[in-house]
Every structure is written in C-alpha cells, then in structure tokens.
Amino acid sequence: MDFNLTEDQKLIRDMVREFAENELAELAVELDANAEFPKAVLKKMAELGLLGLTAPEKYSGGEMDIISVLIAIEELAKACASTATIFALHNLVVSDAIARFGTEEQKK
C-alpha cells in the first residue's frame, strides 16, 4: 500500500498551508479573543474553492477525496482551530448532506 500523498493532495496541502500562514494565522488570536465568526476568511476560502472540496464537479465542487479534506483541516488547524472546525463542518457535514439529500436547486 502506498502512503505517499498524490500530486493533488500535495497541491491542496501547499495551497492551504500558504493561505493559513499568510492570511489566517495573524487573525486567529483576534478572532478567538473576540469570539468572532471569520466571515472575511471564509469568503476568501470560498474564492479559493476550499468550501466545496467534496462537492461534485458538476456543481463546481472539487470532488476531492477525504484525505485531501483532512490535509486541509490539519493545515488550517495549525493557524486557527476554530476556522478549521468551521471548514470541516462545512465540507464534511453540510456539503455532504446537500449532495446526498438536497434538491437540484440546492445543489447548484
């Protein structure tokens, strides 16, 4: 069994790591101290395609595997555990529920 990361997984890791280090880390303490929901951070994550990693490609998602999502969670958590949790819930719970049970309109 090959436990090496695929090229796609390496790309996700590097992109999320760069985002977390350059845009999230400096905000993390302030967000947590003020109990703020990171709206601007999530907007940027959406622009990067990170909030649809598990969604099917036909709905503009990344259709990534679970390992890619877990790698992204790990990289985000290094900078801000709260944001990583929001990201995880969105990609692993919300997107999955919509993909499985949502109407066609909701999926779009």
Image (cartoon, rainbow, N blue to C red):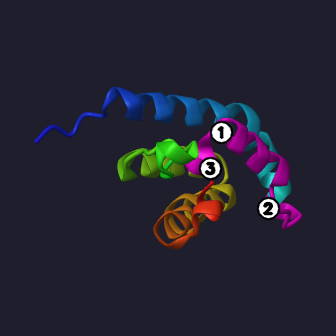
Residue 51, disc: 3
Crowdedness of circle 1 by 10 Å Cα count: few (<14), some, many (20+)?
many
- When asked about the image quadrant of residue 34, the answer is bottom right
Q: Position of residue 61 (x, y in %)?
A: 54, 45
Q: Which residues are magenta?
A: 32-52
The residue identified by callout 2 is: 32
Residue 101, disc: none
Eye-nearest disc, 2 or 1: 1
Q: Are marks 3 and 2 in contact (CB under 8 Å)?
A: no
The residue identified by callout 1 is: 20
Give the quadrant of the C terminus: bottom right
Instruction: Give the side of residue 42 with respect to residue 108, left or right.
Output: right
Q: Which one is in front, 88 or 52? A: 52
Residue in view at x 79 percent, y 41 percent:
26
* Residue type marked 1: Ala
| CA distance for labels 3 and 2 | 21 Å
| CA distance for labels 1 and 3 | 14 Å
| Sooner in the amino-acid sequence: mark 2 or mark 1 | 1
Eye-nearest disc, 1 or 3: 3
Instruction: Give the side of residue 37 with respect to residue 51, left or right.
Output: right
Q: Which one is in front, 10 or 51? A: 51
Q: Is residue 76 visible?
A: no
Crowdedness of circle 2 by 10 Å Cα count: few (<14), some, many (20+)?
some
| CA distance for labels 2 and 1 | 15 Å
